[in-house]
Amino acid sequence: MALIECYECKRSISSEATACIHCGAPTAEAQAAHAEKGTSTISFGSLPRNRAVPEAYVPPPAPERPKIMPAAAGRRRRSQLVEPVVNPDGSRPVEGWLKIMVFLMPLVFVWFLLRSGHTLKQRFFGFGWLGLLMLCVAISPTPPPV
């Protein structure tokens, strides 16, 4: 006698048992014996149907109505479809915030001019301003140590 696993509940049962003591499912040997005799067993998955009980009514799916979206969603979608702004010569314009930040903190923001689309002239002014400020710092007199 050995312990085997029930195929229904996955618990251990005796190999000599004809059905699981936990869930009542017949063992594989018992099913094979019933199949040879021509009898069948009722399992939880194959209960007989009662034809006297009418079938449940399942209504057909409702036709799809067009989705109603808030007005802001439409504006957002239309604004995303707008073509990017490009200068007449095909270059990318320097945005206002970038101009201000390159003027105030060029060491950090001048690197944004290296993005694709900026012209050599725009980069020259940005890096020139950075170089001028670095030169001013380098030649400024330092006070003597105390």
Image (tube, rainbow, N blue to C red):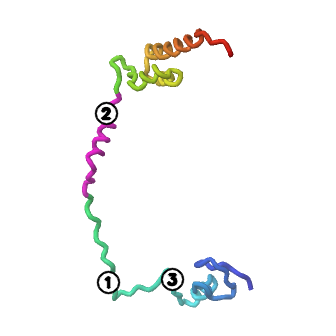
Residue 81: image location, x then y, percent: 32, 36
Of the residues shown, which amino acid type is indicated by label 3? Phe
Q: Find residue 82 and name its label.
A: 2
Residue at 52% in and 11% down: 132
Residue 5, magenta (yes or no): no
Q: Earlier in the sequence, mark 1 or mark 2?
A: 1
Residue 74: image location, x then y, percent: 28, 44
What is the count of numbered marks? 3
Q: Which residues are magenta?
A: 65-84
Quarter of image, res 23:
bottom right
Which residue is under mark 1? Answer: 54
Select label 1 or label 2 by which is in front: 2
Q: Quadrant of the C terminus?
A: top right
How crowded is the residue under tag 2: few (<14 C-alpha within 10 Å), some, or many (20+)?
Answer: few
Which residue is under mark 3? Answer: 44
Q: Does 100 appear above or below 8?
A: above
Q: Does 144 appear above or below 77?
A: above
Of the residues shown, which amino acid type is indicated by label 2? Val
